[in-house]
Each structure stands twice: as C-alpha cells, then as structure tokens.
Image: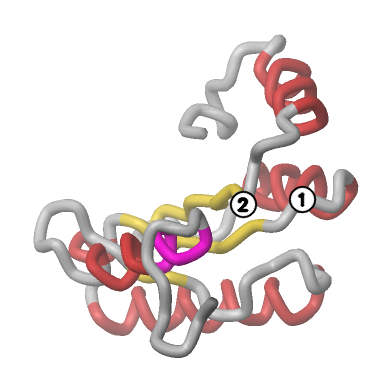
Amino acid sequence: MPGYGFRHPESFLKAVEGYLKTRKSLKITFLLVDGKVGFQKWDEVALDMLEEFNIPYGLVMTKIDKAIPSQRLRNMLYLQQIRDKYTSVNCFSQPFMVSSITGEGIAYFQAYIAHITGNLLLEGSP
C-alpha cells in the first residue's frame, strides 16, 4: 500500500490496521521499500504492524534502477539486517529487488506471487 510514509493522512494507519486485521483471505502482504531512499522510519512502523498482527509478508526493494550500484547494495544489506534483527517467521526470507522501468526482478516476483496464490505449481507439488 503506497502512501503510509511521510505524507500519509491521519486516518491511514487506522484504515490499514482495520484492513489487515479483518482480511481473512489475505495470503501475504509486501512491504515496499524505495531502493534509492532505503528503509525509513515509516517502513519500520509498517513492519512492526505486520509483526504485531502476525501477518505473512515479504520485503520488496523498488525503483532499483534509480539507485547507483553501491547505494543499491548498501540499502539491500541494510534491509537484510532489518529482516534478520526485527522479523519472525512471518517474513519471507529473501527480499525482492524490482524495477518497473527496466523490468529487473519482476518475473521472479510475479512467479513467487503466482506460486503462493496457487496459480503456479512447482514440479512435484500436489
């Protein structure tokens, strides 16, 4: 859900909380982290909410085409530290890196979503 950061409306957190608590069909949610800016205070608020509500989630670094390679690496390593330090088994262990401009990482991310929603069966799966 975009918009939970710096300029979010006051009602946003309550609306998200209500949505996350009542969506029984929710299989997973994804926390999107800007690849150029990196993990921010509001990302931590969102992560804390997902952990508190025991909701499965994955971490996605977006806009990786906007970051220079060293910045992208630094932000990804920090994101992995956050994952290791603050997350439980609710977090998918591998952060995704994607760019909607270049398409980098999109196919892998789509395949993961298709698999967890039952639309892509792996070889040997029932």
Going 37% across and 66% down the picture, which residue do you hit? 120
Give the amino acid at mark 1. Answer: Ile
**The residue tagged with tag 1: helix, strand or loop?**
loop
Residues at discs 1 and 2 in contact (Cβ within 8 Å): yes
Residue 32 x, y percent position in the rendering:
48, 51
Q: Nearer the viewer, residue 84 or 113?
A: 113
When the figure is inspected, residue 67 is found, relative to residue 56, above or below; the finding is: below
Residue 108 x, y percent position in the rendering:
31, 72
Going 63% across and 49% down the picture, which residue do you hit? 27
Magenta-span inclusion, residue 92:
no
Give the amino acid at mark 2. Answer: Ile
When the figure is inspected, residue 84 is found, relative to residue 47, above or below; the finding is: below
Residues drawn in magenta: 112-116
Q: Nearer the viewer, residue 36 or 94?
A: 94
Label 2 belongs to which residue? 28
94 left or right, relative to 15 = left
Q: Nearer the viewer, residue 18 or 121?
A: 121
When the figure is inspected, residue 81 is found, relative to residue 92, above or below; the finding is: below
Lower sequence index among marks 1 and 2: 2
Residue 97 x, y percent position in the rendering:
36, 70
Q: Residue furthest left?
A: 102
